[in-house]
Image (cartoon, helix red, strand yellow):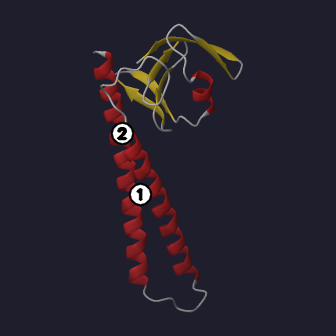
Amino acid sequence: MTKMDLKKSLLEVCIARQQETAAELQHEVNETLRLSNEYGAPKDRYDPYRTKLMNQNNLFAQQLRQANTLLVTLQKIPVDKEINTVEFGAIVITNKQKIFVSVGMGKVELDGETYYAVSPQVPIFQAMRGKKAGDSFVFNGQTFQIKEVF
């Protein structure tokens, strides 16, 4: 598998996972709205059940907006752009782990390999930003050697 194919496949896995998360959250938003509508009008000014439903709905709606934002961010990653330094959209292979600079999704499995999808806002990215293959960086007291960036 070429590096570009690897990046494309990894990106597809991340997008599919994010789409699944967004679909689950959309279902929760719809379900809390359905329950709220079935319950009817508030029984009194301080109806705790209806308040709880609306709070849940607001929480799920907020999480759905965030999930959709992350999905849009993933969809903006160019798979055919040649990358030589650690930047947004790069896959970084170190002596300790494989990192995909994209959005904060954590562990992503692909073809038996583990990659860590991290946001450009996290400290490990700040430690390796702008570095290239052959460089090293220190994070949490550990020295990482960068083997490849693409």
Q: Farthest residue in the top direction?
A: 134
Residue 73's image quarter? Answer: top left
* In this view, 116 is above or below 68: above
Q: Which mark is residue 76?
A: 2
In the foreground, 43 or 1: 1
Residue 93 position in % (x across, y down):
47, 16
> Label 2 sits on what residue type?
Lys
Say which residue label 1 marks.
Answer: 25
Residue 127 position in % (x across, y down):
62, 24
Please state, as top left, top right, bottom left or bottom right, where the C terminus lies in the image. top left
Residue, x 40% and y 74% (percent of image)? Answer: 33
Q: Secondary structure at mark 1?
A: helix
Marked residue nearer the N-terminal end (1 or 2):
1
Query: In the drawing, does residue 49 fall left or right of residue 31?
Result: right
Residue, x 59% and y 35% (percent of image)? Answer: 122
In the foreground, 19 or 47: 19
Q: Farthest residue in the right direction?
A: 141
Which marked residue is nearer to the observer: mark 1 or mark 2?
2
Residue, x 35% and y 29% (percent of image)? Answer: 10
Exactly how many numbered labels are in the figure?
A: 2
> Label 1 sits on what residue type?
Leu
Q: Residues within 10 Å of mark 2 (few under 14, many from 20)?
A: few
